[in-house]
Structures are given as structure tokens and as C-alpha cells.
Image (tube, rainbow, N blue to C red):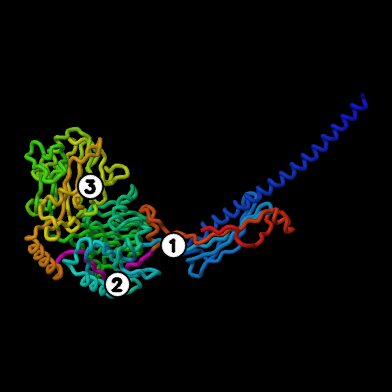
């Protein structure tokens, strides 16, 4: 029994030894496989790190760098090598290959990129309805490496229907001749829709007005606001080397003085340079903004101007003439307004009777094109708007205001004062209710109690930007049913009051450009008189005078330097192709290659193209 027991023990020990031996072999094989898998992963990570480092290091100011400052680098448990870096001679395209190495595994990435510089319209951007220019042959307009021309955004001209008032060809010929006389590589003149042409894509604005409002909104504690109109006389005003936003809330006069700075200069009115040696030197963007009918920018005579960046002129000018109508609707359950002598609805929908209509509002009413819906202590237009009566009936009911058809905005501005709010809100209809707008709906206010509305005023600047509803061009000849019968109010600018609880419309007022058939001849005669005045030198539109010591040079670097607070996209790289190749350590061993750190890569067809 003892020997048999000993034999069993020996067998058990031998079996255990064999099991341990096999277990160790399997363990070693598993560890080896784990090292291979880890090497694969680390090689990919090394290649990705190298690829990212190349992307960050190959960016130049106007294209890709001609060479890199490195050819390889160590990373955790591996390294990468830059196998090739081949930029085009003009720096606008590049092809490079990087390989990551670890544990005998290699991962290769090849990529091609194109340079996509930030777009900006050019040395001078005219976003104005109408312009004339007097440019001295000594003026230098430099369009930069691409010789960009002076850009005229033609949308305001067409939106205001100025073709019936001021012939396009006359303006175009004058501007082409004026700017063509300038020296430099950007004195030509081009007209187009800046947004449709893609010039504004990187700026994330729809027009120069949005650029102006964006710049004003980007101001912070370090920037400067100067009450205008402002005059510098016989002094040197240097705003320093740090880029700033300097805003002058009116016109700027430089009388034998010097203004020097960089960043963004905003002038809200005309620029006049007078005296023996007035100077304006600015690196960045100069924005001139005005809503007056005439905007002179006088940089002639002895004026020295050096703008490196761009000059942007944002002019909202509207020619006089014509008149607007106001039609008021109010929703009730009876078809008339109780207690105010309301007129029953002449149409089928009893919830939308028209109550009041005022023809030739801007002529008969002394305030011209201003509608005082509600006015603290006065309510001077209540006999046409009946807005205060509506508010009184609602009492403390929560409501909100809404703009509709704001594309036909008439360049209207508003002023809204609500008791309990921290400020009086001012803005433009086309840009909505600003700080008092509800989230995601700039065309609607936040909720408020009806009897807290103190003042609400709409001031229309341009009849030509209102909806045109003329008897002579419409099948409808029964006013104001033509507006009142339509849920869309015939696309007329509409101001609505809605109940907050369910959104029901309680009040609507529509504003539009209207004439009866017998008034058209009178309007055409007024336009002819206005045309004669403007063509003989009358003051309308933008006038740009540039003298012999004026240099306006397009400089994308200066513009990009102030682009961050304005939300510009900046220079970008476009990936036009990426290919990868991976070789495992086992594949190397199969080829008789040592599985050491940094084994050389094999070259074959890419394993997976990617765009």
C-alpha cells in the first residue's frame, strides 16, 4: 500500500508538473500576443500624435510652412517619424506622411491638405444703397496678393427699388471711373451680392450692418467709447499698440491732428479731415456707420490716411417720397370691438375683423413715419392704433409682442419700455427684440403683464423696404380689406400682441407702402424732382473723397488679428484626402524583420482610404 500510494503521488506530481509547464507556455504565448496588440495600439497612437503635431506646426500666416522643425519624436512606449513633407511652391497645398512605431508594429498616415484663407470683401467694402466717389490719381488702393477690387454690395440698391429713381448704369460708370484712376492693385470696382458671392461666409454676418452691430456688441471693459460727434484739433491721439475697439458715437473730424491705433475703429457718422496735415493711421478694420440720408467721407486735400486692413462703409439711406398706411386688426368673439364703435368684419372670419385704417399716415400725421402705439402720458396716436384700449381691457393678463413679415421691415426701429424691466429696449425690427427676446425666437418678446407696457414706438425709415400694396398693381381695390382679409397680412410688416397662455392673437397692426391709382402720377412727379436734385449734386447716398496721400491696403493678417471677438472663422485647412497603412509585429516577423522598437515599415497599398 505504501508503494502504491507513493506511485500515485509521483503520478500526481508529474501530472502537476506537466500541467504547470503547459500553463506557463500558454501564459507566455498570451503575454506575447498582448504585447503585439499593445504594440499595434501604441503605433497607431504614435502616428496620430505625429499627425496632430504636423497639423499644428505647418500653419503659416498665408499658407503652409515650407518646412517643419522636426523629423521624428519619441512618445510613450514608441516614436513617430515624418517620412515626407511636401508643400507646394505657393504654400497653398501640402502632402505629408508620418509613421508611428512601437513593439515592431507600424502605423502610417498620409494626408493632403489645401489652404483656405479667411475671406473678406476687400480693401473697401461699400454696403450702401447709392454712392459717388472722387478719387485722386495719387490715391493708392491695394487689394493685397489677390488684387481684390473695391466691393459694392448691390442688395440695398435693389431692395430700395432705386432703379426707378437713380439709374444703375450712371452710378456704376461713375464708380468704375473714379476707382479705376487710383494706383495700386485694387482700384477696380466690382458690384455683387456679397452674401451670395460667399465673401461673408467666414465673417458669419449677412451684411455690413450685422458686422457693425457685432463689433458694438463685442466691446468690453478695455475698449473705448467716445461721445460724438467728436473733433481732434491740433493733437496726437495714439490709442496704443494693443488692439482695441474704439467707438465714436457720431461723426469724426480730424482738424490738423493725428489719430493712430489698431483694432476696430467705429465711426457713427461722417469723417472729415481738414487743416494743414491731418492724419489717420489705423491697422485693422475701420467701420463707418450711418442712417442719415447723406454720408460724406472726406479724406481729400492734405489728408494723410494709411489704413492697413479694410475700410467698411455701412450706410442705411432711404430716399424720401410716398407714404405708408396703417391697418389695425383685433381678434374678438363677436366680430367687432365692444365699447369703441367697432366695425363688424366684412369677411368670413369673425375672429379677424379690421377695425381701423389710416391712409397716408406719414403725411397726415405730423410725426411722419413714426407710429406711437403706446406712449407714456400721451398716447398721441390712440385714435388710429387703439392699442392702449386693448392693453387696458387685458389688465394684468400675461402677453407678449411679436414681429411678423420682418423681411419687409422698412428699416424700422423700435423703442419698448415695460415697467419692472431693468432697461428701455431699443433695436431694429429686422434684428428682433434683442435682450428682451425669448430664447430661440428673436421676433418675440418675453412674457409681461399687459398693463405694464408703458411705451411702444415703431419708427419706419424706408417706405421702399415695406411691402408695396398699390391699387394700380393689385387686383384688390377695396382697402383695407386687402390687408385685413389675409392671415399673412399680404406680407406687410405686422406687429402682434398674443396671449401668453395659449398664443392667441389679440391685436395686429400692419404697416405697408400704399397708393391709390389716382396718386401714382403725383408720386412719379415727386420722384422725378428728387432724381433731378440728386443728379445735380443733391445730398443723398454715400460720397467718398480720397486724396493723393491716401493709402487703403487690404491686409488679411490685420483683419484676422481682430477676428476672434467678432466671431470670424479665420484661416482654415481643408483635408482633401487621408490614407492609412498598418503592419503588425507578427507580419514583420513573418517577413524576417526583427520585432524591435522602431522596426522599419513596409510599403504597400493603403489599407483604407478616408476623406
Residue 17: within the magenta?
no
Residue 162 in the figure: left or right of residue 554? left
User: Which residue is outermost to the top?
Assistant: 1
Where residue 306 sits in the image (x, y, percent)?
A: 32, 66
Q: Which mark is residue 359?
A: none
Q: Is residue 410 above or below residue 274?
A: above
Q: Mark 1: which secondary structure?
A: strand
Any part of residue 254 in sight: no
Inter-mark Cα distance, 1 to 2: 31 Å
Which residue has dot 1 on it? 116
Q: Quadrant of residue 307?
A: bottom left
Which residue has dot 2 on it? 139
Which residue has dot 3 on it? 403
Where residue 264 sits in the image (x, y, percent)?
A: 33, 57
3 vs 2, front mark: 3
1 vs 2, front mark: 1
Where residue 302 sits in the image (x, y, percent)?
A: 25, 70
Q: Few, some or many C-alpha atoms within 10 Å of disc 1 (few <14, some 14-19, many ≥20)?
A: some
Task: Give the residues drawn in magenta, as a range.
Answer: 538-555
Residue 124 in the figure: left or right of residue 230? right
Between discs 1 and 2, the one toward the N terminus:
1
Q: Quadrant of residue 548?
A: bottom left
Residue 382 in the figure: left or right of residue 44? left
Q: Main secondary structure of the magenta part?
A: strand
Between discs 3 and 1, the one toward the N terminus:
1
Q: Mark 2: which secondary structure?
A: loop
Q: Mark 3: which secondary structure?
A: strand
Amino acid at each position: 500500500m505504501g508503494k502504491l500510494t507513493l506511485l500515485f503521488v509521483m503520478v500526481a506530481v508529474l501530472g502537476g508538473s506537466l500541467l504547470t509547464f503547459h500553463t506557463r507556455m500558454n501564459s507566455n504565448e498570451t503575454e506575447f500576443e498582448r504585447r503585439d496588440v499593445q504594440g499595434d495600439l501604441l503605433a497607431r497612437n504614435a502616428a496620430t500624435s505625429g499627425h496632430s503635431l504636423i497639423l499644428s506646426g505647418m500653419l503659416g500666416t498665408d499658407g503652409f510652412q515650407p518646412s517643419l522643425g522636426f523629423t521624428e519624436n519619441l512618445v510613450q512606449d514608441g516614436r513617430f517619424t515624418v517620412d515626407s513633407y511636401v508643400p507646394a511652391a505657393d504654400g497653398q497645398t501640402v502632402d505629408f506622411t508620418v509613421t508611428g512605431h512601437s513593439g515592431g508594429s507600424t502605423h502610417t498616415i498620409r494626408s493632403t491638405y489645401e489652404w483656405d484663407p479667411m475671406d473678406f470683401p476687400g480693401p473697401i467694402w461699400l454696403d450702401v444703397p447709392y454712392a459717388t466717389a472722387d478719387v485722386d490719381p495719387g490715391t493708392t488702393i491695394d487689394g493685397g496678393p489677390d488684387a481684390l477690387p473695391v466691393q459694392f454690395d448691390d442688395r440695398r440698391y435693389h431692395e430700395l427699388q432705386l432703379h426707378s429713381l437713380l439709374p444703375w448704369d450712371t452710378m456704376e460708370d461713375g464708380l468704375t471711373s473714379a476707382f479705376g484712376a487710383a494706383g495700386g492693385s485694387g482700384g477696380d470696382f466690382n458690384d455683387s451680392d456679397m452674401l451670395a458671392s460667399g465673401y461673408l461666409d467666414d465673417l458669419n454676418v449677412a451684411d455690413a450692418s450685422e458686422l457693425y452691430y457685432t463689433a458694438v456688441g463685442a466691446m468690453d471693459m478695455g475698449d473705448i467709447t467716445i461721445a460724438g460727434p467728436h473733433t481732434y484739433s491740433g493733437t496726437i491721439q495714439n490709442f496704443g499698440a494693443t488692439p482695441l475697439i474704439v467707438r465714436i458715437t457720431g461723426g469724426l473730424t480730424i482738424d490738423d491732428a493725428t489719430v493712430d491705433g489698431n483694432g476696430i475703429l467705429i465711426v457713427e457718422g461722417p469723417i472729415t479731415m481738414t487743416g494743414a496735415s491731418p492724419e489717420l493711421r489705423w491697422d485693422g478694420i475701420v467701420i463707418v456707420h450711418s442712417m442719415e440720408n447723406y454720408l460724406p467721407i472726406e479724406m481729400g486735400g492734405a489728408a494723410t490716411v494709411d489704413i492697413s486692413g479694410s475700410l467698411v462703409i455701412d450706410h442705411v439711406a432711404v430716399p424720401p417720397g410716398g407714404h405708408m398706411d396703417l391697418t389695425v386688426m383685433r381678434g374678438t368673439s363677436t366680430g367687432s370691438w365692444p365699447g369703441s364703435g367697432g366695425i363688424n368684419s366684412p369677411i368670413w372670419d369673425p375672429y379677424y375683423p379690421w377695425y381701423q385704417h389710416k391712409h397716408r399716415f406719414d403725411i397726415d400725421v405730423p410725426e411722419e413715419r413714426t407710429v406711437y402705439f403706446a406712449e407714456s402720458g400721451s398716447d398721441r396716436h390712440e385714435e388710429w392704433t387703439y392699442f392702449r384700449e386693448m392693453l387696458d381691457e387685458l389688465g394684468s393678463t400675461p402677453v407678449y409682442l411679436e414681429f411678423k413679415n420682418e423681411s419687409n421691415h422698412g428699416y424700422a426701429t423700435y423703442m419698448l419700455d415695460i415697467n419692472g424691466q431693468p432697461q428701455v429696449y431699443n433695436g431694429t425690427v429686422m434684428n428682433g427684440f434683442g435682450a428682451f427676446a425669448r430664447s430661440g425666437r428673436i421676433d418675440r418678446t418675453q412674457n409681461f403683464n399687459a398693463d405694464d407696457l408703458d411705451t411702444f414706438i415703431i419708427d419706419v425709415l424706408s417706405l421702399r423696404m415695406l411691402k408695396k400694396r398699390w391699387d394700380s398693381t393689385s387686383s384688390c381695390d377695396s382697402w383695407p380689406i386687402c390687408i385685413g382679409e389675409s392671415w399673412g397680412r399680404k406680407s406687410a410688416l405686422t406687429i402682434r400682441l398674443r396671449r401668453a397662455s395659449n398664443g392667441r392673437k389679440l391685436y395686429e397692426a400692419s404697416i405697408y407702402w400704399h397708393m391709390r391709382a389716382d396718386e401714382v402720377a403725383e408720386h412719379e412727379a415727386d420722384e422725378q424732382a428728387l432724381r433731378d436734385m440728386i443728379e445735380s449734386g443733391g445730398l443723398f447716398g454715400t460720397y467718398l473723397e480720397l486724396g493723393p496721400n491716401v493709402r487703403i491696403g487690404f491686409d488679411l493678417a490685420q483683419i484676422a488679428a481682430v477676428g476672434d471677438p467678432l466671431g470670424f472663422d479665420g484661416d482654415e485647412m481643408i483635408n482633401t484626402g487621408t490614407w492609412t497603412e498598418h503592419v503588425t509585429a507578427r507580419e514583420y516577423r513573418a517577413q524576417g524583420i526583427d520585432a524591435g522598437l522602431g522596426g522599419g515599415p513596409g510599403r504597400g497599398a493603403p489599407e483604407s482610404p478616408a476623406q
